């Protein structure tokens, strides 16, 4: 296993269960998305349900072992495409499980869990799983204010993305597994 995806915070790993999403988690995931993103950027309930149904193996959740509730998640769709486009946000049928790349569609961590390393552990666990699944590259878009955070996770800024999702200007970032 590549050392760049090693567990950084054992306390996080002890406190949370990392697993694929289950259908019964859908309501919580929709609510977390609503909390974490403004309305113009958030995934709709319809699109979230479609992602969960189409690509549950690419939807990693962190469950707080103390409460049994979701604290956050990371989700994406597999593809052979290598440039992020807005249609990935709205069309789960673009998911091709045999695809070598993954378009990450959201890293969501509830406010009360932020700043403690949960987002990083979600990202690293996702990378470990996808590396083990033979995937080659993860791509995402983020606002300028998040570029440095993703660089700390090992992502490379590829510049301004060909995305106008939510009426925003995004950076496209990627990491080769």
Image (tube, helix red, strand yellow):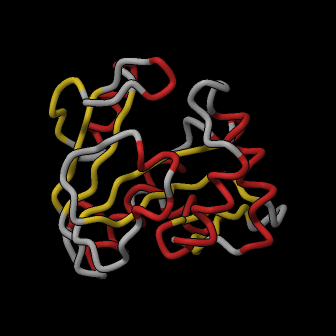
Q: Position of residue 42 (x, y in %)?
A: 61, 35
Front residue of this view, candidates 62 and 143: 143
55 over 87 or under it: above or below: below
- Residue at the location (32% across, 41% down)? 85
- Residue at the location (21% across, 67% down)? 3
Q: Position of residue 7 (x, y in %)?
A: 39, 64
- Residue at the location (29% across, 65% down)? 79
Q: Is residue 6 left or right of residue 20?
A: left
* Quarter-of-image position of residue 20: bottom right
Q: How many marks?
A: 0
Q: Is residue 2 left or right of residue 15?
A: left
Q: Is residue 56 left or right of residue 5?
A: right
114 over 124 or under it: above or below: above
- Dividing the image into 4 quarters, which one contains the N terminus? bottom left
Q: Position of residue 109 (x, y in %)?
A: 61, 44
- Dividing the image into 4 quarters, which one contains the C terminus? bottom left
Front residue of this view, candidates 93 and 159: 93
* Quarter-of-image position of residue 16: bottom right
């Amino acid at each position: 296993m590549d050392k760049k995806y090693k567990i950084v915070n054992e306390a996080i790993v002890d406190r949370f269960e990392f697993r694929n999403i289950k259908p019964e988690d859908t309501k919580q995931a929709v609510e977390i998305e609503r909390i974490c993103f403004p309305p113009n950027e958030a995934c709709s309930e319809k699109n979230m349900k479609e992602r969960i149904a189409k690509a549950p193996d690419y939807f990693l959740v962190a469950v707080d072992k103390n409460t049994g509730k979701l604290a956050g998640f990371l989700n994406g769709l597999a593809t052979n495409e290598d440039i992020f486009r807005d249609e990935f946000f709205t069309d789960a049928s673009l998911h091709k499980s045999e695809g070598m790349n993954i378009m990450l569609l959201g890293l969501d961590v509830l406010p009360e869990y932020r700043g403690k390393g949960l987002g990083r552990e979600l990202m690293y666990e996702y990378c470990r799983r996808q590396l083990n699944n033979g995937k080659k590259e993860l791509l995402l878009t983020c606002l300028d204010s998040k570029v440095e955070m993703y660089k700390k996770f090992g992502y490379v800024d590829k510049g301004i993305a060909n995305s106008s999702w939510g009426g925003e200007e995004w950076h496209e970032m990627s990491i080769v597994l």
